[in-house]
Image: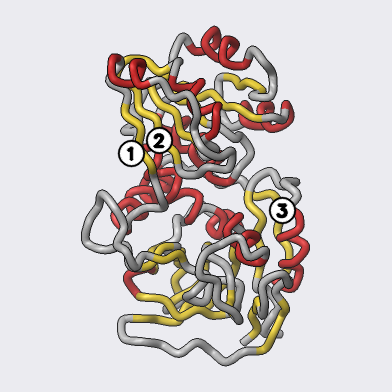
Amino acid sequence: MKAMVLNAVGEKPVLTEVDLPQVKDGEVIVKLKAAALNHRDVYITQGLYPAIKTPTILGSDGVGELDGARVVLLPGLKWGDREDVQALDYEVLGMPHDGTFAEYIAIPKASVYPCPVHLSDAEAAAFPLAGLTGWRALMTRASAKTSDTVMVTGAGGGVATMVIQLAVALGCDVYVSSSSAEKIAFAKTLGTKGGVNYTEDNWIAELKEMTGGLDVVVDGAGGEGFSKLSKLMKPGGRMAFYGGTRGTIPKLNPQILFWRQITIAGSTMGSPSEFAAMLDFVSKHKIHPVVDSVRPLAELPAALDRMDAGQQRGKLVVTMEGLSA
């Protein structure tokens, strides 16, 4: 079969002929139709990820066929028996376990789920990792409910975009932050009420005037902005974060947190039961993940460059169409 193989850190994956994957107990082979990129893939090629092994096939998101049916793949392996936290040996598909940038993948049968019928192959490839991460942060850790006022930071990112779509479908009043007026405008097309540019000095005051206060924050950045947002939380508010691209969180006021009974919750990926619940929700509300572009698998390096430059609006997808011809 053909696969994009990363041979060494600092290089780009190369289209290579490799052996079909070997099936272990409990596994099946899925013929992949499309796969999507995540920042994880970029970070691994740059050596910015722990315990990297090469050669490897990256890719955590995929849609394919099994026994004639279209399926999507759970991007996390070995979650464990606890719903509240993943097991110590939990891993994300696509290193060390070979991932979805290939014609075929061997994967535990329990990680294969029916694909929502309303989605195209590109859309189906686009949402598993971002959707699962966003679902756990929003629905499980932040306990979002209809009519909550929800703030989503980093509009335009893959997880942030899915959180926006999930929260809007839930019936929340959703607001966003970004350094880009274009990304704030695009978020409004997804149903958000408004947004603020966090590079401007008065963004917190502007957000307070817009919202009157926040029930939920879903954040992927950390940094000083997280501390500032805590001051806008309503009593009983919940702040969930799944990333820390802006570093440590300074000047977090404990008096505000304990007096208003604010919950701060870290969140990573999600469990199989959360993945199933997210799939049901996406199907029920006919959510269409945002796809930036679709290109052949061989053009994966160009897609990685586009992601690294932050040029995408939605998910970058590669397709396996024509590889077997």
The CA distance from mark 3 to mark 1 is: 29 Å
Q: Nearer the viewer, residue 154 or 120?
A: 154
130 sits left or right of 25 in the view: right
In the rendering, at what x and y percent does residue 247 appear? 55, 40
Q: Tell me, yes or no, whether the two marked residues, 1 and 2, touch with CB atoms within 8 Å.
A: yes
Marker count (numbered): 3
Quadrant (top left/top right/bottom left/bottom right) for the N terminus: bottom right
How many other residues sit within 10 Å of disc 2, few (<14), some (14-19) or many (≥20)?
many
In the rendering, at what x and y percent does residue 216 appear? 40, 26
How many other residues sit within 10 Å of disc 3, few (<14), some (14-19) or many (≥20)?
some
Q: Residue at x 33, y 28 (%)?
A: 145
Q: Tell me, yes or no, whether the two marked residues, 3 and 1, touch with CB atoms within 8 Å.
A: no
Would you place residue 265 above or below residue 64 in this image? above
Q: Residue furthest left?
A: 81
Q: Residue at x 62, y 16 (%)?
A: 203
Quadrant in which residue 201 is drawn: top right
Which of marks 3 and 2 precedes in the sequence?
A: 2
In the rendering, at what x and y percent does residue 116 appear? 45, 55
| Residue placed under numbered mark 1 in the picture | 141
Quadrant (top left/top right/bottom left/bottom right) for the C terminus: bottom right
In the rendering, at what x and y percent does residue 300 appear? 71, 67
User: Mark 2 belongs to which amino acid?
Assistant: Ala
User: Mark 1 belongs to which amino acid?
Assistant: Arg
Q: Residue at x 31, y 57 (%)?
A: 86
Would you place residue 171 above or below residue 287 in this image? above
Label ID, residue 240: 2
Which of marks 1 and 3 precedes in the sequence?
A: 1
99 sits left or right of 312 in the view: left
User: Mark 3 belongs to which amino acid?
Assistant: Asp
| Residue placed under numbered mark 3 in the picture | 308
Q: How is the image coloured?
A: secondary structure
